[in-house]
Amino acid sequence: MATTDNAQPVGLPDERPPANTVGPVAWLRNNLFNTWYNAILTVLVLALLGSAIPPFLDWLLIKAHGLDATSQECRQGGGACWGFVNEKLRFIMFGTFPYDEQWRPFATIAIFIALLLASCDRRFWKPWFGLVWAAGLAAVAILMWGGVLGLTYVENTLWGGLPLTIILSVIGLAVAFPAAILLALGRRSNMPAVKVLCVTYIELIRGVPLISLLFMASVMFPLFLPNGVSVDKLLRAQVAFIMFAAAYMAEAIRGGLQAIPKGQYEAADGLGLGYWQKMRKIILPQALAVAIPPLVNTFISFFKDTSLVIIIGLYDLLGTAKAALSDPAWRGFYREAYLFIGVIYWIFCYSMSKYSQKLERDLNRSHRR
Amino acid sequence: MATETRTTQGAPAPGGVSFSLSDPTVRAVVYQILVVGAVVLVGWFLISNTLDNLARRSIATGYHFLEREASFGIGESMIDYSPKDSYGRAFLVGVLNTLKVSIIGIILATILGTLVGVARLSSNWLIAKLASTFVEIVRNVPPLLQLFFWYALVSDSLPPVRNALNPLPGVFLSQRGLWVPSLSASPVWATMGIAFAVAVILTIFLNRWAKDRQARTGQIFPTARAALGLLIGLPLIAYVAGGAPTALDMPRLAGFNFVGGMALSPEFFAILTGLTVYTSAFIAEVVRSGIVAVNWGQTEAARALGLPSGPTLRLVILPQALRVIVPPLTSQYLNLTKNSSLALAIGYPDLVSIANTTLNQTGQAIEGVTMIMGTYLTISLSISIFMNWYNKRIALVER
């Protein structure tokens, strides 16, 4: 019988599992050499990595020049020239912001990172946290522009580097979010005129590349405005980003709206709630919770896309790195420059995507039950 | 009958027109009038400003400038083009270049992405980790940065033309790009093209006949092998019958550059590599999630029915996985096409870059931007229509 087969003999110590099913050897056998083709692939990949990684590490660290190396020393050969990044560090990070005042963009970055990190904690997802954000943004505006509290005024044409990248993406997102909610609601509205307008807007923006919107911002916006009124380049780029982000976020929110079962709408109607009450109290809280992971993904691609402002002549992180490379003394050290800013972009985007995955798991857990 | 009832219910009560804002229908109409009115008002404001500004700067509107002489050179073109040609033709060159890099990019990204996506699911730990490292690095770095990197890699790290690398006879690699030998012109190529077209038509008929026969008799015809034989065999026969020409057009150094052969410019290389690598990381994720979405029980059920592993994949797994894969894949194709506009930043003459030059030379900002947007909308719509048609073909047929 089955029970007698499973019965443990009393008094005997537990037997260790066979040696070929546990331990590193078994792991190798199961994960790297489980079939003949996997064995061949493993060997090939190991050979490839063995030929690529040591020279790369050599270049990156072992043969690399120190942080104080000059370009003459670097040009004599050897590995990476970190002296370049060291010398241009503040230009790449903060652009042409006045040198003595560069603690201000630094503080801006710190404020944004603190706000973003705090926003990751779901305990802070309360209405009052919006006020914290507003205070943070006000502090950022004071720090970047100055002109009050004894800070010297800095024109926004001098802004650049990482603060510009973060400002473009965060402000763009913050302004586009309410617009995106309205667009998403409009797209699902019963009113044909509103629906057609929203669908046209969303599909038009999603059908064209961001560059064409930036072009529009840089060459067409000046024509749209009454004579004598001019808007500076940064604000025009920001408007283009907001228009772009609103369309993509509207689609993410629409996905959330579609996930809400019809019963929720009917229940709200049954309680006698009006349209806006129904949306604000019943539908949107649920729909936005579902839409958060796609919204975070939109934000990631949006963060990467801010690098396109280089095309209309703004110096974000990629723009300053490129400008640093055009210094004749340091021409040709593009590997170091691109690796450096690539790592910065990567840290931001990777942490956000990990966070979005975690959030998706958490939200799914509450949905599954 | 039904309509009549509805009209009587919806009609205002006899004896007076009821017009109350508490009636949802009336409210909806009022809202819509307000919204449309606001949009029209804003539009009118912008348009009147624009016309005013254009008049002030004395810029003529309209597309007549397209017929004027462009008088700028274009680095690479698939059709004959010289600076004496019109702006319209220059724009056409740009559209063709965009299509070229998008189509090749879509094909390569699909292949690379599928490989990486399957590799992420490999039972081989090393390969799975390598593939996921690739995806995580590539996805999280801006595509423009990657393009700059690839472009700098070619234009800064490769030797100048005079010291071009010559890894294989006839293959030259330099800052100016890659030159490879091309096949000399011969009538055989045209014959081979016709043979291939005939093979495609035959394959379609063969497929119909085989399906019909299977439906009637249950016998399976090895369509895939026969089609492969036709598609390769017929052009091969045409090639041999034409005398199997082997003459090659070798690139050679003349003056400051190579002539002859087939050239791959550094700009084209950079934009193609950048787009392919970047998009393949996203396609890999799409493919992986599609495969994971098919329940393992499906494989077991197919095995239990006695299907060998090939038909299991072809008849059971893939049709279900594709249903999950195709919609997000479509948006990746659209993204690749739209991202090809980044070519502007490295100087590949795509349509945005040529429209940019045009609008700088002529001052026709509005026309230039609308042409860019119109072309991309057309391309995007065509891709979505094609992919929607394909998606409908493979969609689950439900009750």
Image (cartoon, coloured by chain):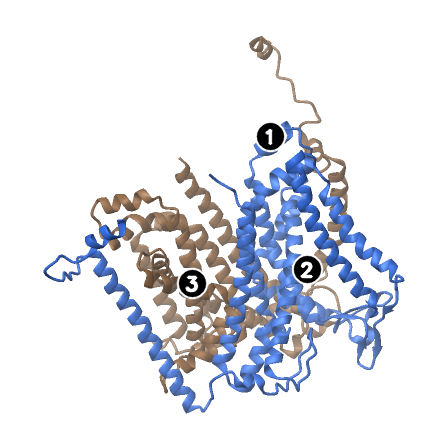
Q: Colour of chain B?
A: blue
Residue placed most toward the observer, B252 or A36: B252
Could you tell me residue B176's position as x and y percent? 74, 74
Q: Quadrant of residue B297?
A: top right
Residue placed most toward the observer, A171 or A116: A171
Q: Is residue B111 left or right of residue A174?
A: right
Q: Chain of mark 1?
A: B
Q: Residues within 10 Å of mark 3 (few under 14, many from 20)?
A: many
Q: Quadrant of residue A295?
A: bottom left
Element class at badge 2: helix
Could you tell me residue A55's position as x and y percent? 74, 57
Q: Is residue B14 left or right of residue A287?
A: left
Residue labelled with disc 1 = B301
Element class at badge 3: helix
Residue A60's tag is: 2
Mark 1: amino acid: Ala
Residue placed most toward the observer, B130 or B49: B49
Residue A313's tag is: none
**Count of marks placed on residues:** 3
Identity of the residue drawn at 38% across and 87% down = B52
Nearer the camera: disc 2 or disc 3: 3
Distance CA(mark 2)–CA(mark 1): 52 Å
Residue A202's tag is: 3
Q: Is residue A163 left or right of residue A191?
A: right
Please, which residue is most extreme toward the right here? B243
> Does residue B343 sit above or below B86 in this rendering?
above
Distance CA(mark 2)–CA(mark 3): 45 Å
- Which chain, by letter, is brown? A
Mark 3: amino acid: Ile
Q: Chain of mark 3?
A: A
Could you tell me residue A53's position as x and y percent? 72, 53
